[in-house]
Amino acid sequence: MAGYLTTHVLDTARGCPAAGLAIDLYRIAGETRTHLRRLETNADGRTDGPILPEAEFATGTYELVFHAGAYLDASGTPPESPRFLDTVPIRFGMSEPAHYHVPLLLSPFGYSTYRGS
């Protein structure tokens, strides 16, 4: 099986997918953090394709940075200064070629994640 990475974001406060949320993907190697790409979620709260496709997959440590503050601002969530959640970084390892799915369940004051399928 070839490896690849997907994600999706659900807005648990509004009970809907988080459309239009920007996500950055980084590869971590020691102290080096390399930006690989920026994608945005679609109407279903997912990216249009894998955030790390099979052709680019490599085992190692990665970080997804979800730009929650900008999404919350655009969705009409009452503003705070500063926002309790602005960027949400999730650092994780991929140890074998497999489908890794890292979803984010988001609200203005909390979030959770897990290794999905």
Image (cartoon, grey):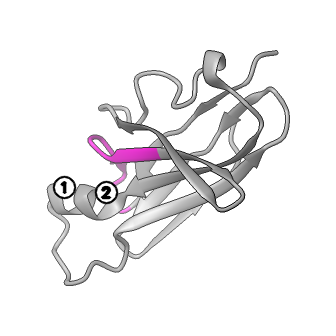
Q: Nearer the viewer, residue 64 or 15?
A: 64
- Label 2 or label 1, whichever lies nearer to me, is 1
Q: Nearer the viewer, residue 85 or 14?
A: 85
Using the numbered discs, state the Cα–Cα distance from disc 2 to disc 1 in whole angstroms: 9 Å
The image quarter in which residue 41 lies: top left
The image quarter in which residue 82 lies: bottom left
- The quadrant the C terminus occupies is top right
1 to 64, vertically: above or below: above
**Residue 21 lies in the magenta stretch:** yes
The spot of residue 92 in percent (x, y) is: 69, 53
23 to 77, vertically: above or below: above
The spot of residue 3 in percent (x, y) is: 73, 24
Q: Are marks 2 and 1 in contact (CB under 8 Å)?
A: yes
The residue to which callout 2 is attached is: 14
* Mark linked to residue 75: 1
- The quadrant the N terminus occupies is top right
Total marks in image: 2
Instruction: Label 2: state its secondary structure.
Output: loop
Give the amino acid at mark 2.
Arg
Q: Nearer the viewer, residue 64 or 35?
A: 35
* Region of the chain picked out in magenta, as a range: 13-24
